[in-house]
Amino acid sequence: MGREALDSSLTSHVSSFMSHVSCLKSHVSRFMSCVLCLTSCVFLTVTGCSAKGQYIDALFAATISQLARAQKAGAEQLAESEFEDSKRLFAEAENALKNKDKQAGFLIQKAHAKARLAEALAKQATAERELAKLKAELDEASAEANRVRLEREAAERELAGLTPR
């Protein structure tokens, strides 16, 4: 084989090799795009779950505080049903969270709302009881004022009925 044939064969092989390198570059580029996309998906999923986990943790803490406020407002006696429902839902949410059940978020939101309702009902009952007490005191004061008015009127009549002697 002559030099020209060797040069032609080498050129052909180099050209084929360069074609394969170009094809390989294209595949590597696509692969890297896929890896980047997959990494982004994993990152977003993890941070999304993390954010959701942080939200649920915050909601658990808020519900614990809400239950304490409801208890302080007297919900155990004045809104017993709602208060007990809230505590039951809280326990169910804790179990759901431990079991990685997707209902945990819903259950804790419902427990929080029930605790808020229990607190509001307890405060309403307390306010209505205070209002009734104040109304009774007002009625008593009004009756006293009326009695004093009648005494005054009697004294005025007596004074008006007096004539000099």
Image (cartoon, rainbow, N blue to C red):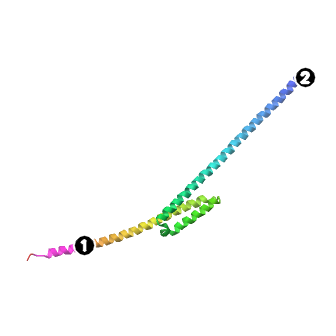
Callout 2: few (<14), some (14-19), or many (20+) C-alpha neighbours within 10 Å? Answer: few
User: Along the line of sight, which residue is nearer the eye, 23 or 64?
Assistant: 64
Q: Which residue lies furthest to the top in this view?
A: 3
Magenta region, residue range: 147-163
The residue identified by callout 2 is 2
Residue at position x 47%, y 69% in the image = 78
Q: Image check: 98 left or right of 85?
A: right
User: Along the line of sight, which residue is nearer the eye, 88 or 8?
Assistant: 88
Q: State the image coordinates of residue 18 (x, y, percent, origin top left).
A: 79, 31
Question: Which SS type dominates the magenta stretch?
Answer: helix
State which quarter of the image contains the N terminus.
Answer: top right
Residue at position x 53%, y 57% in the image = 62
State which quarter of the image contains the C terminus.
Answer: bottom left
Q: Which residue lies furthest to the bottom in this view?
A: 165
Q: Which amino acid does label 2 sit on?
A: Gly
Q: State the image coordinates of residue 43 (x, y, percent, origin top left).
A: 65, 46
The residue identified by callout 1 is 148
Give above or below for 30 relative to 134: above
Give above or below for 37 relative to 125: above
